[in-house]
Amino acid sequence: MMKIKIAVILIFVLLFTAACASVSEDELIPEFGNYDESKGTDLGGYEFIMASARAGSENPINPQSGNTARGDRLIQRYKDTEEKFNVKITVLDECSVGDLVVRSAAGMKYADLMAVKINEIVTGKYIQNGYFIPFSGMNIDLDSGIYGPTNMLEGGYFAGEYYGIISYYWGFPAADTMPAMWFNPRVISNYRQASPHELDEQGEWTWATLEKMCEAIHDTSDPDPEKRTYALAYTSEPYLEFAALYSNNARVATKGADGRLSYALNSKEAAEAMNFLVSLAERDLICDGGNRQNITPFIENRRAFFVEYTHLGLSDEGADNLSYRMEEAYEWIYFPEGPSGAGTKSRTAYSFWTRFMYATLNTDPNVMEILLPYMFQPLPGETTETWQDDFRRTTFFTEESFDYFQILRDEAFFDYTAYTPFTDVLQPRLLAMTRGTASVAETLESIGDKMQASLDKLYNAYVE
């Protein structure tokens, strides 16, 4: 009987593969292409250079042949693009904004596209000083979906133009949001707690439920602090703090009708979020994990939950993440809803370290207009409906986790933290509040002037 089942599965896989392989690239072009085939598309050997900031030890847009199926499909897309348009595609493993500045000053090109973290671009005023050109000035359809969802595009919006895109249908670099949340099914089961997936389905995935889980999953009997079990842990970055804020509809900044940003953490929702975490910490229900990527206790079954950037759970995004280090299943979930959450699933954000792709000053916009609609469509053998199938099978343990990943990705908003004094003010003050060394109400109010001054300097000064 087992052999029959295996045979049926194999037949299904073969049929599915054949169906995917039957999709021709030419069938997809009319949906995204805006160029006239009759005029020819020979770009005369143009070298199209992409520079990519790594996420971990891997570079998803410069894959090695044979490592992953999706990597091989991307390599094939590069080859098809080179042949179709007579171009040479070069991928640099590291981004260097410094090299961009030096070469631009000399009238030379460093790269056409740079996949780089938004905080580096914004705080260095590289958009403000004209080192990047907007995609909204090109003849490409930003509403097509292939360059990222609408909420993501907001992260690249500046002074009336759209500067940042992602290769959405490639699946990598990931539409990297923060904070994602994972749970360890073994720990949840060992302490006889309900699955967060089931709780959410029943409308019971709330702060109150999480608080009860923190009380239940709490074993500090071992004299060695490294062997104690907690549901939640702090890290040296305020991922847990942002999770609480965003799940309660608190925002770092909001945009007014005039397009200007205003500091918004001096709110009831923000105070509720910080006080919730403080109340857990005061009862020793949150472990101070110390290091930024507090993965080890989670994979060793001493934590029920782990909170970080999305790419820490994706196999194509680095060898130090959960998919390489976790020997058992891990499941995706979003942070539970706060009392002021109002039912929103927008509990994660494109944030300070999110990676976008930027077009540099010395690229050729006409080349962009021709190449991007072709390059960024679903990879060979995939469509807009099937592009995630392989991604789902190879990355997620359950269909439910894949569904939550999609919500984290597609419901995310842009939080404007890149325009704030993040490392000097916002990050340390959030950590101070939840560690009990600073008053919540006073701190949220007192940092307002510095936060607003930064928003004005980096963003509002360029709003017409």
Image: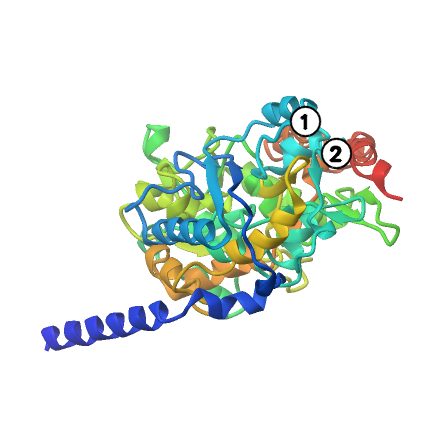
Task: Give the spatial CA distance, label 1 vs label 2.
Answer: 13 Å
**Residue visible at 37% across and 49% down in the picture:** 71
Mark 2 secondary-structure assignment: loop
Residue that label 1 marks: 107
Q: Residues within 10 Å of mark 1 (few under 14, many from 20)?
A: few
**Residue visible at 59% across and 55% down in the picture:** 148
Residue 207 at x, y percent in the picture: 57, 54
Which quadrant would residue 115 be assigned to in this image? top right
Identify the disc placed on residue 130.
2
**Residue visible at 54% across and 45% down in the picture:** 44
**Residue visible at 34% across and 46% down in the picture:** 323
Quadrant for the N terminus in the image? bottom left
Q: Is residue 59 above or below residue 384?
A: above
The amino acid on which the numbered mark 2 sits, given as a three-letter code, is Gly
Q: Is residue 389 above or below residue 60?
A: below
Q: Could you say which is closer to the camera, residue 359 or residue 70?
A: 359
The amino acid on which the numbered mark 1 sits, given as a three-letter code, is Gly
Q: Could you say which is closer to the camera, residue 228 or residue 109?
A: 109
Which sits earlier in the primary sequence, circle 1 or circle 2?
Answer: 1
Please state if 266 lies on the left or on the right of 316 as rendered. Answer: right
Residue 429 at x, y percent in the picture: 67, 30
Please state if 318 lies on the left or on the right of 249 as rendered. Answer: left
Q: Is residue 345 above or below residue 459?
A: below
